[in-house]
Image: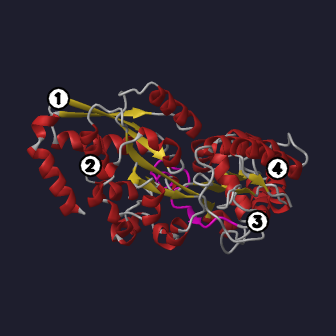
Amino acid sequence: MKKVLLTVLLVALLSVALFAEKTITVAAGAVGIELELARQAAAEFEALFPGVKVNVLDTPDMVQDRLGLYLQFFEAQSDRVDVYQVDVIWPGDLAQHFVDLYEYGANDYVPNHFPAIVENNTVDGRLVAIPWFTDAGVLYYRQDLLEKYGFDGPPETWDELEEMAHVVMAGEKKNNPDFWGFVFQGNAYEGLTCDALEWIASNNGGTIVNRDQEITIANQNAAEILEQVAGWIGDICPEGVLAMDEEGARKVWQAGNALFMRNWPYAYALGNADDSAIKGKFDVAVLPHGKGESAATLGGWQLAVSKYSKDPALAAQVAFFMANYDHQKARAMESYNPTIKTLYQDPEVLEAVPFFGSLYDVFTNAVARPSTASAPNYNEVSTLFFKAVHQIISGQSNDALATLEELALDIAAVTGFEPVFE
Protein backbone atom coordinates (compact mmCIF):
# COMPACT_ATOMS: atom_id res chain seq x y z
CA MET A 1 0.00 0.00 0.00
CA LYS A 2 2.80 2.41 0.90
CA LYS A 3 4.60 1.61 -2.39
CA VAL A 4 1.45 2.43 -4.34
CA LEU A 5 0.97 5.66 -2.40
CA LEU A 6 4.58 6.66 -2.98
CA THR A 7 4.17 6.09 -6.72
CA VAL A 8 1.06 8.23 -6.84
CA LEU A 9 2.71 11.00 -4.85
CA LEU A 10 5.79 10.98 -7.06
CA VAL A 11 3.59 11.39 -10.12
CA ALA A 12 1.76 14.19 -8.36
CA LEU A 13 5.04 15.86 -7.42
CA LEU A 14 6.14 15.80 -11.05
CA SER A 15 2.90 17.58 -11.86
CA VAL A 16 3.01 19.99 -8.94
CA ALA A 17 3.07 22.97 -11.27
CA LEU A 18 -0.41 21.99 -12.35
CA PHE A 19 -1.48 22.02 -8.70
CA ALA A 20 0.01 25.42 -7.84
CA GLU A 21 -2.30 27.86 -6.11
CA LYS A 22 -5.10 25.29 -5.96
CA THR A 23 -7.73 24.94 -3.23
CA ILE A 24 -9.63 21.73 -2.51
CA THR A 25 -12.53 21.74 -0.07
CA VAL A 26 -13.54 18.59 1.77
CA ALA A 27 -16.97 18.35 3.43
CA ALA A 28 -16.41 16.21 6.53
CA GLY A 29 -18.20 15.11 9.67
CA ALA A 30 -17.53 16.23 13.23
CA VAL A 31 -18.78 13.33 15.36
CA GLY A 32 -16.24 12.60 18.07
CA ILE A 33 -12.84 13.70 16.76
CA GLU A 34 -13.64 13.12 13.07
CA LEU A 35 -13.07 16.74 12.14
CA GLU A 36 -9.74 16.92 13.95
CA LEU A 37 -8.47 13.79 12.17
CA ALA A 38 -9.62 15.07 8.77
CA ARG A 39 -7.84 18.38 9.33
CA GLN A 40 -4.65 16.57 10.34
CA ALA A 41 -4.69 14.61 7.07
CA ALA A 42 -5.39 17.80 5.12
CA ALA A 43 -2.42 19.52 6.77
CA GLU A 44 -0.16 16.61 5.83
CA PHE A 45 -1.24 16.86 2.19
CA GLU A 46 -0.53 20.60 2.24
CA ALA A 47 2.93 19.94 3.65
CA LEU A 48 3.68 17.56 0.78
CA PHE A 49 2.26 19.96 -1.82
CA PRO A 50 2.87 23.56 -0.67
CA GLY A 51 0.92 24.93 -3.64
CA VAL A 52 -2.28 23.23 -2.52
CA LYS A 53 -4.66 24.40 0.21
CA VAL A 54 -7.04 21.76 1.59
CA ASN A 55 -9.98 23.25 3.46
CA VAL A 56 -12.08 20.96 5.65
CA LEU A 57 -15.69 22.08 5.91
CA ASP A 58 -17.57 21.19 9.09
CA THR A 59 -20.98 19.69 8.24
CA PRO A 60 -23.99 18.83 10.44
CA ASP A 61 -23.81 15.72 12.64
CA MET A 62 -27.38 14.69 11.87
CA VAL A 63 -27.34 12.60 8.69
CA GLN A 64 -30.55 14.11 7.31
CA ASP A 65 -29.23 17.63 7.88
CA ARG A 66 -25.95 16.81 6.17
CA LEU A 67 -27.73 15.25 3.21
CA GLY A 68 -29.95 18.33 2.92
CA LEU A 69 -26.87 20.55 2.76
CA TYR A 70 -25.30 18.36 0.10
CA LEU A 71 -28.45 18.37 -2.00
CA GLN A 72 -28.43 22.16 -1.99
CA PHE A 73 -24.89 22.12 -3.41
CA PHE A 74 -25.81 19.52 -6.01
CA GLU A 75 -28.96 21.33 -7.12
CA ALA A 76 -26.89 24.46 -7.71
CA GLN A 77 -24.12 22.39 -9.35
CA SER A 78 -21.84 24.22 -6.95
CA ASP A 79 -18.06 23.88 -7.12
CA ARG A 80 -17.72 25.03 -3.51
CA VAL A 81 -17.06 21.47 -2.31
CA ASP A 82 -14.70 19.12 -4.16
CA VAL A 83 -14.72 16.06 -1.89
CA TYR A 84 -17.76 14.87 0.07
CA GLN A 85 -17.85 12.54 3.05
CA VAL A 86 -20.81 10.31 2.17
CA ASP A 87 -22.74 7.76 4.20
CA VAL A 88 -22.66 4.09 3.22
CA ILE A 89 -26.35 4.39 2.27
CA TRP A 90 -25.91 7.25 -0.22
CA PRO A 91 -23.89 6.01 -3.24
CA GLY A 92 -26.96 4.67 -5.06
CA ASP A 93 -28.96 7.85 -4.56
CA LEU A 94 -26.17 10.38 -5.21
CA ALA A 95 -24.04 8.63 -7.85
CA GLN A 96 -25.03 11.07 -10.60
CA HIS A 97 -23.19 13.87 -8.77
CA PHE A 98 -19.85 12.08 -8.42
CA VAL A 99 -17.01 11.22 -10.78
CA ASP A 100 -15.85 7.67 -11.48
CA LEU A 101 -12.74 7.29 -9.32
CA TYR A 102 -11.46 4.51 -11.55
CA GLU A 103 -10.68 7.25 -14.06
CA TYR A 104 -8.27 8.81 -11.54
CA GLY A 105 -6.29 5.79 -10.35
CA ALA A 106 -8.61 4.02 -7.89
CA ASN A 107 -7.57 0.62 -9.28
CA ASP A 108 -4.35 1.00 -7.29
CA TYR A 109 -6.30 1.24 -4.02
CA VAL A 110 -9.43 -0.88 -4.36
CA PRO A 111 -7.82 -4.32 -3.70
CA ASN A 112 -6.84 -3.23 -0.17
CA HIS A 113 -10.42 -2.55 0.97
CA PHE A 114 -13.26 -4.83 2.02
CA PRO A 115 -14.87 -6.04 -1.24
CA ALA A 116 -18.41 -5.61 0.11
CA ILE A 117 -17.83 -1.90 0.74
CA VAL A 118 -16.25 -1.41 -2.68
CA GLU A 119 -19.29 -3.14 -4.19
CA ASN A 120 -21.58 -0.87 -2.17
CA ASN A 121 -19.78 2.17 -3.59
CA THR A 122 -19.90 0.93 -7.18
CA VAL A 123 -22.88 2.06 -9.28
CA ASP A 124 -23.22 0.84 -12.88
CA GLY A 125 -19.54 -0.12 -12.87
CA ARG A 126 -18.44 3.31 -11.63
CA LEU A 127 -16.62 3.67 -8.31
CA VAL A 128 -18.33 6.77 -6.94
CA ALA A 129 -16.58 6.79 -3.54
CA ILE A 130 -13.42 5.40 -1.95
CA PRO A 131 -14.01 3.66 1.43
CA TRP A 132 -12.80 5.72 4.39
CA PHE A 133 -14.01 4.02 7.57
CA THR A 134 -16.67 1.47 8.34
CA ASP A 135 -18.98 1.01 11.30
CA ALA A 136 -21.31 -1.40 13.05
CA GLY A 137 -23.38 -0.89 16.15
CA VAL A 138 -21.92 -2.26 19.40
CA LEU A 139 -22.87 -2.43 23.08
CA TYR A 140 -20.77 -0.49 25.58
CA TYR A 141 -21.07 -1.71 29.16
CA ARG A 142 -19.68 -0.75 32.57
CA GLN A 143 -17.67 -3.83 33.45
CA ASP A 144 -16.93 -2.52 36.93
CA LEU A 145 -20.62 -2.11 37.78
CA LEU A 146 -21.66 -5.49 36.41
CA GLU A 147 -19.00 -7.10 38.60
CA LYS A 148 -20.05 -4.98 41.59
CA TYR A 149 -23.62 -6.29 41.35
CA GLY A 150 -22.70 -9.90 40.72
CA PHE A 151 -23.06 -10.26 36.95
CA ASP A 152 -20.48 -12.36 35.11
CA GLY A 153 -20.54 -10.49 31.80
CA PRO A 154 -22.59 -8.39 29.40
CA PRO A 155 -26.16 -9.33 28.49
CA GLU A 156 -26.83 -11.72 25.64
CA THR A 157 -30.52 -10.82 25.26
CA TRP A 158 -32.57 -7.65 25.54
CA ASP A 159 -34.42 -9.23 28.48
CA GLU A 160 -31.10 -9.72 30.29
CA LEU A 161 -30.16 -6.12 29.57
CA GLU A 162 -33.39 -4.98 31.23
CA GLU A 163 -32.78 -7.21 34.25
CA MET A 164 -29.21 -5.99 34.74
CA ALA A 165 -30.24 -2.38 34.25
CA HIS A 166 -32.93 -2.61 36.94
CA VAL A 167 -30.56 -4.18 39.48
CA VAL A 168 -27.69 -1.76 38.91
CA MET A 169 -29.95 1.30 38.74
CA ALA A 170 -31.53 0.40 42.07
CA GLY A 171 -28.12 0.55 43.70
CA GLU A 172 -26.47 3.39 41.82
CA LYS A 173 -29.37 5.85 41.96
CA LYS A 174 -28.96 6.03 45.73
CA ASN A 175 -25.83 8.11 45.20
CA ASN A 176 -26.38 9.30 41.64
CA PRO A 177 -29.98 10.22 40.77
CA ASP A 178 -28.87 10.91 37.17
CA PHE A 179 -27.83 7.29 36.62
CA TRP A 180 -29.70 5.23 34.00
CA GLY A 181 -29.55 1.74 32.63
CA PHE A 182 -29.33 2.32 28.88
CA VAL A 183 -28.88 5.12 26.38
CA PHE A 184 -29.06 4.95 22.59
CA GLN A 185 -29.87 7.03 19.50
CA GLY A 186 -33.57 7.70 20.05
CA ASN A 187 -34.13 10.95 18.17
CA ALA A 188 -36.21 10.85 14.98
CA TYR A 189 -33.34 10.66 12.46
CA GLU A 190 -31.20 8.12 10.60
CA GLY A 191 -29.53 7.01 13.83
CA LEU A 192 -32.86 5.67 15.05
CA THR A 193 -33.24 3.74 11.80
CA CYS A 194 -29.92 2.04 12.62
CA ASP A 195 -30.87 1.23 16.22
CA ALA A 196 -34.37 0.06 15.35
CA LEU A 197 -33.14 -2.16 12.53
CA GLU A 198 -30.88 -3.89 15.07
CA TRP A 199 -33.76 -4.46 17.48
CA ILE A 200 -36.08 -5.73 14.78
CA ALA A 201 -33.58 -7.93 12.93
CA SER A 202 -32.47 -9.47 16.26
CA ASN A 203 -36.09 -10.43 16.95
CA ASN A 204 -36.61 -12.11 13.55
CA GLY A 205 -38.55 -9.10 12.32
CA GLY A 206 -36.74 -8.62 9.00
CA THR A 207 -35.02 -5.59 7.48
CA ILE A 208 -37.92 -3.26 6.52
CA VAL A 209 -37.65 -4.05 2.78
CA ASN A 210 -36.11 -7.33 1.65
CA ARG A 211 -33.88 -8.02 -1.35
CA ASP A 212 -36.91 -9.03 -3.42
CA GLN A 213 -38.29 -5.51 -2.88
CA GLU A 214 -41.09 -6.72 -0.62
CA ILE A 215 -42.06 -4.50 2.31
CA THR A 216 -41.80 -6.79 5.33
CA ILE A 217 -41.89 -4.39 8.26
CA ALA A 218 -45.51 -5.03 9.28
CA ASN A 219 -45.01 -8.19 11.32
CA GLN A 220 -45.64 -9.26 14.90
CA ASN A 221 -41.97 -9.80 15.79
CA ALA A 222 -41.11 -6.23 14.79
CA ALA A 223 -44.08 -4.85 16.70
CA GLU A 224 -43.21 -6.91 19.76
CA ILE A 225 -39.64 -5.66 20.11
CA LEU A 226 -40.62 -2.03 19.49
CA GLU A 227 -43.25 -2.31 22.23
CA GLN A 228 -40.53 -3.67 24.52
CA VAL A 229 -38.33 -0.67 23.73
CA ALA A 230 -41.25 1.67 24.41
CA GLY A 231 -41.41 0.14 27.87
CA TRP A 232 -37.79 1.13 28.50
CA ILE A 233 -38.49 4.86 28.22
CA GLY A 234 -38.74 6.39 31.67
CA ASP A 235 -37.87 3.00 33.18
CA ILE A 236 -34.30 1.97 32.31
CA CYS A 237 -33.83 4.82 29.82
CA PRO A 238 -34.26 8.55 30.50
CA GLU A 239 -37.08 10.35 28.70
CA GLY A 240 -34.35 12.44 27.11
CA VAL A 241 -33.14 9.43 25.10
CA LEU A 242 -35.93 10.26 22.65
CA ALA A 243 -33.92 13.33 21.62
CA MET A 244 -30.44 11.77 21.69
CA ASP A 245 -28.07 11.33 18.76
CA GLU A 246 -24.66 9.61 18.92
CA GLU A 247 -22.95 12.42 20.78
CA GLY A 248 -25.88 12.97 23.13
CA ALA A 249 -25.77 9.34 24.21
CA ARG A 250 -21.98 9.35 24.46
CA LYS A 251 -21.89 12.38 26.74
CA VAL A 252 -24.31 10.77 29.22
CA TRP A 253 -22.35 7.52 29.09
CA GLN A 254 -18.92 9.10 29.32
CA ALA A 255 -19.99 11.18 32.33
CA GLY A 256 -20.62 7.92 34.17
CA ASN A 257 -24.40 8.19 34.08
CA ALA A 258 -25.36 4.97 32.26
CA LEU A 259 -24.71 1.25 32.57
CA PHE A 260 -25.13 0.42 28.87
CA MET A 261 -24.87 2.39 25.65
CA ARG A 262 -25.49 1.49 22.02
CA ASN A 263 -23.13 3.43 19.78
CA TRP A 264 -20.49 3.13 17.07
CA PRO A 265 -16.84 2.16 17.72
CA TYR A 266 -15.59 5.78 17.67
CA ALA A 267 -16.76 6.23 21.28
CA TYR A 268 -14.23 3.71 22.62
CA ALA A 269 -11.13 5.91 22.42
CA LEU A 270 -13.01 8.91 23.78
CA GLY A 271 -14.31 6.85 26.69
CA ASN A 272 -10.74 5.96 27.60
CA ALA A 273 -9.42 9.50 27.33
CA ASP A 274 -7.72 11.00 30.40
CA ASP A 275 -10.67 13.33 31.06
CA SER A 276 -13.26 10.55 30.91
CA ALA A 277 -15.10 9.57 34.09
CA ILE A 278 -15.23 5.95 32.91
CA LYS A 279 -11.66 5.47 31.72
CA GLY A 280 -10.66 1.82 32.22
CA LYS A 281 -14.07 0.90 33.62
CA PHE A 282 -15.90 -0.34 30.52
CA ASP A 283 -15.75 -2.80 27.66
CA VAL A 284 -17.49 -3.48 24.34
CA ALA A 285 -19.59 -6.46 23.26
CA VAL A 286 -21.97 -7.57 20.55
CA LEU A 287 -25.47 -6.16 20.86
CA PRO A 288 -28.11 -8.27 22.63
CA HIS A 289 -30.80 -10.13 20.72
CA GLY A 290 -34.43 -11.11 21.00
CA LYS A 291 -35.88 -14.24 19.36
CA GLY A 292 -33.15 -14.28 16.73
CA GLU A 293 -29.43 -13.61 16.61
CA SER A 294 -27.58 -10.42 17.46
CA ALA A 295 -27.69 -7.85 14.66
CA ALA A 296 -25.46 -4.82 14.11
CA THR A 297 -26.35 -2.22 11.51
CA LEU A 298 -23.71 -1.53 8.89
CA GLY A 299 -22.50 2.05 8.96
CA GLY A 300 -19.50 3.86 7.64
CA TRP A 301 -18.37 6.73 5.48
CA GLN A 302 -16.69 7.18 2.13
CA LEU A 303 -15.02 9.99 0.20
CA ALA A 304 -16.57 10.99 -3.13
CA VAL A 305 -15.40 13.59 -5.65
CA SER A 306 -17.95 16.04 -7.00
CA LYS A 307 -18.40 16.13 -10.76
CA TYR A 308 -18.84 19.89 -10.34
CA SER A 309 -15.30 20.28 -8.95
CA LYS A 310 -13.02 22.56 -10.95
CA ASP A 311 -10.18 20.08 -10.48
CA PRO A 312 -11.51 16.52 -10.01
CA ALA A 313 -8.06 15.01 -10.65
CA LEU A 314 -6.51 16.84 -7.72
CA ALA A 315 -9.61 16.27 -5.59
CA ALA A 316 -9.33 12.54 -6.24
CA GLN A 317 -5.70 12.55 -5.08
CA VAL A 318 -6.77 14.30 -1.87
CA ALA A 319 -9.47 11.66 -1.32
CA PHE A 320 -7.04 8.78 -1.93
CA PHE A 321 -4.49 10.38 0.40
CA MET A 322 -6.96 10.87 3.25
CA ALA A 323 -8.17 7.26 2.90
CA ASN A 324 -4.73 5.66 2.55
CA TYR A 325 -3.17 3.05 4.84
CA ASP A 326 -1.33 5.47 7.12
CA HIS A 327 -4.34 7.71 7.72
CA GLN A 328 -6.72 4.80 8.19
CA LYS A 329 -4.28 3.42 10.75
CA ALA A 330 -4.15 6.76 12.56
CA ARG A 331 -7.94 6.81 12.64
CA ALA A 332 -8.06 3.15 13.74
CA MET A 333 -5.89 4.03 16.74
CA GLU A 334 -8.70 6.41 17.72
CA SER A 335 -11.26 3.56 17.26
CA TYR A 336 -12.61 4.45 13.81
CA ASN A 337 -12.95 1.14 11.98
CA PRO A 338 -10.65 0.90 8.96
CA THR A 339 -11.84 -0.39 5.60
CA ILE A 340 -8.36 -1.72 4.75
CA LYS A 341 -8.37 -5.40 5.65
CA THR A 342 -4.79 -5.79 6.86
CA LEU A 343 -5.21 -3.17 9.58
CA TYR A 344 -7.29 -5.65 11.57
CA GLN A 345 -4.11 -7.68 12.07
CA ASP A 346 -1.93 -4.68 12.91
CA PRO A 347 -0.48 -5.18 16.44
CA GLU A 348 -0.52 -1.47 17.27
CA VAL A 349 -4.15 -1.12 16.23
CA LEU A 350 -5.21 -4.19 18.21
CA GLU A 351 -3.34 -2.94 21.27
CA ALA A 352 -5.13 0.40 21.07
CA VAL A 353 -8.57 -1.08 20.28
CA PRO A 354 -8.67 -4.77 21.32
CA PHE A 355 -12.27 -5.34 20.29
CA PHE A 356 -11.40 -4.73 16.64
CA GLY A 357 -10.00 -8.24 16.76
CA SER A 358 -12.59 -9.94 18.96
CA LEU A 359 -15.56 -8.38 17.14
CA TYR A 360 -14.09 -8.63 13.64
CA ASP A 361 -16.99 -10.85 12.48
CA VAL A 362 -19.50 -8.25 13.67
CA PHE A 363 -17.91 -5.59 11.47
CA THR A 364 -17.66 -7.82 8.40
CA ASN A 365 -21.17 -9.32 8.68
CA ALA A 366 -23.20 -6.30 9.71
CA VAL A 367 -26.82 -5.92 8.57
CA ALA A 368 -27.24 -3.46 5.71
CA ARG A 369 -30.06 -0.98 5.62
CA PRO A 370 -32.31 -1.42 2.56
CA SER A 371 -30.62 1.43 0.68
CA THR A 372 -29.89 -0.66 -2.40
CA ALA A 373 -33.29 -2.37 -2.53
CA SER A 374 -35.16 0.93 -2.18
CA ALA A 375 -32.86 3.19 -4.24
CA PRO A 376 -33.34 5.94 -5.27
CA ASN A 377 -36.01 6.35 -2.57
CA TYR A 378 -34.08 5.18 0.46
CA ASN A 379 -34.03 8.54 2.24
CA GLU A 380 -37.84 8.77 2.04
CA VAL A 381 -38.22 5.15 3.17
CA SER A 382 -35.91 5.67 6.14
CA THR A 383 -37.62 8.91 7.12
CA LEU A 384 -41.01 7.18 7.14
CA PHE A 385 -39.50 4.34 9.16
CA PHE A 386 -37.78 6.34 11.89
CA LYS A 387 -40.81 8.60 12.30
CA ALA A 388 -43.08 5.57 12.79
CA VAL A 389 -40.62 3.97 15.21
CA HIS A 390 -40.35 7.21 17.17
CA GLN A 391 -44.13 7.35 17.47
CA ILE A 392 -44.14 3.84 18.91
CA ILE A 393 -41.27 4.12 21.38
CA SER A 394 -42.35 7.58 22.57
CA GLY A 395 -45.84 6.33 23.38
CA GLN A 396 -47.61 8.42 20.74
CA SER A 397 -48.85 5.16 19.23
CA ASN A 398 -50.48 2.55 21.44
CA ASP A 399 -50.72 -0.12 18.72
CA ALA A 400 -47.30 -0.93 17.29
CA LEU A 401 -48.51 -3.43 14.69
CA ALA A 402 -51.17 -1.05 13.34
CA THR A 403 -48.53 1.70 13.08
CA LEU A 404 -46.21 -0.65 11.18
CA GLU A 405 -49.04 -1.67 8.84
CA GLU A 406 -49.67 1.98 8.07
CA LEU A 407 -45.92 2.44 7.58
CA ALA A 408 -45.86 -0.41 5.06
CA LEU A 409 -48.59 1.27 3.02
CA ASP A 410 -46.71 4.58 3.13
CA ILE A 411 -43.52 2.89 1.91
CA ALA A 412 -45.51 1.19 -0.84
CA ALA A 413 -46.79 4.59 -2.00
CA VAL A 414 -43.21 5.87 -2.27
CA THR A 415 -41.57 2.81 -3.83
CA GLY A 416 -44.34 0.94 -5.64
CA PHE A 417 -43.25 -2.25 -3.82
CA GLU A 418 -45.72 -4.80 -2.46
CA PRO A 419 -46.28 -4.89 1.30
CA VAL A 420 -46.36 -8.29 3.00
CA PHE A 421 -48.65 -8.44 6.03
CA GLU A 422 -48.48 -11.13 8.72
**What's the amino acid at mark 1?**
Glu
Q: Disc 1 designates what residue?
A: 21
- Alpha-carbon distance for marks 1 and 2? 21 Å
Q: Residues within 10 Å of mark 4 (few under 14, many from 20)?
A: many
x, y percent for residue 380: 66, 40
Q: Which residue lies most toward the top here?
A: 76
Q: Disc 2 designates what residue?
A: 104
The one nearer the camera, 31 or 280, is 31
Q: Residues within 10 Å of mark 1 (few under 14, many from 20)?
A: few
Name the quadrant containing residue 139: bottom right
Residue at 85%, 39% (x, y): give it: 396
Q: Disc 4 designates what residue?
A: 404
- Alpha-carbon distance for marks 3 and 1? 56 Å
User: Which mark lies nearer to you, 2 or 3?
Assistant: 2
Name the quadrant containing residue 223: bottom right
Colour scheme employed for the rendering of this structure: secondary structure
Q: Residues within 10 Å of mark 3 (few under 14, many from 20)?
A: many
The one nearer the camera, 123 or 173, is 123
- Alpha-carbon distance for marks 4 and 1? 55 Å
**What's the amino acid at mark 4?**
Leu
Q: Disc 3 designates what residue?
A: 203
Q: Are marks 2 and 3 in contact (CB under 8 Å)?
A: no
Of the residues under marks 2 and 4, which one precedes in the sequence? 2
User: Which mark lies nearer to you, 4 or 1?
Assistant: 4
**What's the amino acid at mark 2?**
Tyr
359 is higher (above) or lower (below) than 324: below
Residue at 51%, 50% (x, y): give it: 276
User: Which mark lies nearer to you, 4 or 3?
Assistant: 4
Q: Which residues are magenta?
A: 269-288
